[in-house]
Amino acid sequence: MLPHQLELLSPARTADIGIEAINHGADAVYIGGPSFGARTSADNSVSDLARLVQHAHRFHSRIFCTVNTILRDDELEPARRQIWQLYEAGVDALIIQDMGLLELDLPPIQLHASTQTDIRTPEKARFLQDAGLSQLVLARELTLQQIAAIRAATDPQRSVIEFFIHGALCVAYSGQCFISHAHTGRSANRGDCSQACRLPYEVKDSQGRIVAHEKHVLSMKDNNQSDNLRALIDAGVRSFKIEGRYKDLGYVKNITAHYRTLFDEILEERPELARASSGQTRFSFTPDPNQNFNREFTDYFVQGRQDDIGAFDTPKNPGQAIGWVTRVAPDHLEIETNSPETVLHNGDGLCYHDLQKELVGLQTNRCEPVAGKVGHWAVFPKDPMAGFKDLRKGTEVNRNRDMEWVRALEKKSAERHINVWVRLADADGGLVLTLTDEDGFQGNATLPGPLQMAKDATQARAKLQDNLARLGDTVFAPLDVSLDLGQPWFVPASQANALRRDAVAALETARAAGLLRLPRAQPVHPPVPYPEDTLSYLANVFNQKAHDFYAKHGVKVIAAAYESHEEHGEVSLMITKHCVRFSLSLCPKQAKGVTGVQGTVRAEPMQLINGKEKLTLRFDCKPCEMHVVGKIKRSVLNAAAESPLTFYRTRPTAVSPH
């Protein structure tokens, strides 16, 4: 990708969803392959990926495949074979976490750093660039200033800066969460997170006092950078990533279309920038991120630490307020909507908060307008009315699923076309049809003579232009049809249609030939030193090849990944930029300058409790980070363990700084 190009990078659970992402304006799609992707239920066959590649490449969009779990030694060879299959299927790049892959005999396929590589510093970013990775997705927790510093430390000609702009937020730095494995044996770094961050917790201070009860204090709102795109571009971001390889078709269509619309506006404003693929997209709907599942939105830390980044009351989708209850009957309720224009539909998903602020869902079976009352609706739920706790007159009601919207996105909802100029001209006693697309590619087709003169020149010309412009069943759309003819020739419709089809085929061939493989970056030689010479379990080194990689780059002490079960005691199971103390207004920095409070608030540990699970919160105030501390369960250790590493059989002795 060239430094002035902007890439909208969309997720796909399946090839069919990926195709719709392309149709709705994605410049690239990231998707899982047959295995080794960090989403266990989002695998795809090589043949399906080849089908997606074929569609994407028509628009010069790219397909990136995730091979981003940490790998055991016995998985390296199967992973290597799979990577060759992906390369042969036309996949443009791999998204990887495990540095052991760089030590294998891989095809010349471009490599991108997964979010699991945890890139927070200029030093880490520059190292990965020098190690041969061409696209670097930065930690979601970074500010604009930190992003700009990373861009300044790296080379735009050698690496692309990628950043998440939308979707669910993991509370921990990516790759730095081990709580799922510690409690269940399911490893987030191996694609099987149990999402402990979405659970409710009781929070106690160091004196044992309850400071929060049954709150989802590790659950973040959803990321939405719609208002920050221009600032992110100025900071050096060029690939803009939408989270959601588990998300459904409607989400991918809607969110891709939303950001396509925003980026097209920016490209109109800034002619020095360009999109990374071809074509224009038209939608049959107005994109709206509020229509999809979300936990409300935050722009997280991009503009600095914010007060309101957590979805502490519920990890569910609260939806949008539509009105309030005016009457509760034995088999239905009546709702007065906020606006007379609001229409309820059979099957809509509604919800409300009970007196404990828990979100209660209400699936509608039937919705009918109340006669004589504008804006009033009778709602007949799918479930018995008696089961709806605290539902009473005056309760505010939200809608978190609009069935009319859902049905609209189940149908065809976008068209993407590449603009072409169509020119028919005389050539050697016959005719030549030339299609020139917006990227400068050409396709030609000829009709040999002899030719017939038209009896009605005006009518013949109009019909010929009409026939040549009929590109509706192709990916092309005519901008202009010009007939540069010395005589008013008569061209039968059958010949004009064949000429057009041949020219389209030639243009498709020219475009395919003009799409070059993304180059594999060559690592710097001699190998550059890693920024640190000691690696703990936090580095996720899970195989001998990964060990060899870091050793080659100057690391002296290399501990095994947490999944190797060498860490039996209490360690940091999560490291987060989110701070529970700050969110509960118990941060010492918040108390500075407050009369009567300053000096009384200390960053003492706290405790999280969920049932029998107990975790300790420790606060590192200098970098403004929180550590969720706990230890691996005995049941996990006793279960079928992950294979320990051959290079690391005992704890290494501590190395003194020198």
Image (cartoon, helix red, strand yellow):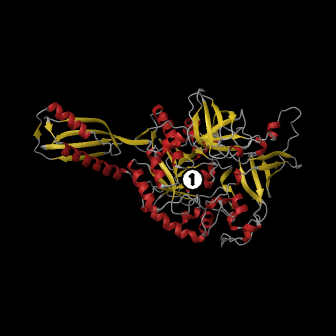
Give neighbour class at mark 1: few <14, some 14-19, many 20+ (Cα, 10 Å).
Answer: some
Q: Is residue 236 above or below residue 652?
A: above
Count of marks placed on residues: 1
Q: Residue 229 is drawn in which quadrant?
A: top right
Q: Nearer the viewer, residue 49 or 225?
A: 49
**x and y, in percent, of residue 648 in the image:** 69, 70
Q: Is residue 342 above or below residue 413?
A: above
Give how far across and how far down residue 10 sits, in percent.
51, 48
Residue labelled with disc 1:
246
Q: Which residue occupies 59% across, 68% down?
A: 545
| Left or right for 49, reference 487 | right
Q: Please, is residue 371 above or below residue 405 in the view?
A: above
Residue drawn at point x = 34 percent, y = 49 percent: 511
Q: Quadrant of the C terminus?
A: bottom right
Residue in front for this viewpoint, 180 or 441: 180
- Residue 27's spot in the image, x, y percent? 46, 46
Toward which corner of the image does residue 88 lie, by quadrant?
Answer: bottom left
**What's under tag 1, amino acid-wise?**
Tyr
**Is residue 633 positioned above or below 508 on the image?**
below
Q: Secondary structure at mark 1?
A: loop
Q: Position of residue 108 (x, y in %)?
A: 45, 61
Along the line of sight, which residue is nearer the eye, 477 or 410? 410
Q: Is residue 262 visible?
A: yes
Question: Does the rendering let one see residue 7?
Answer: no
Q: Residue at x 66, y 69 (%)?
A: 642
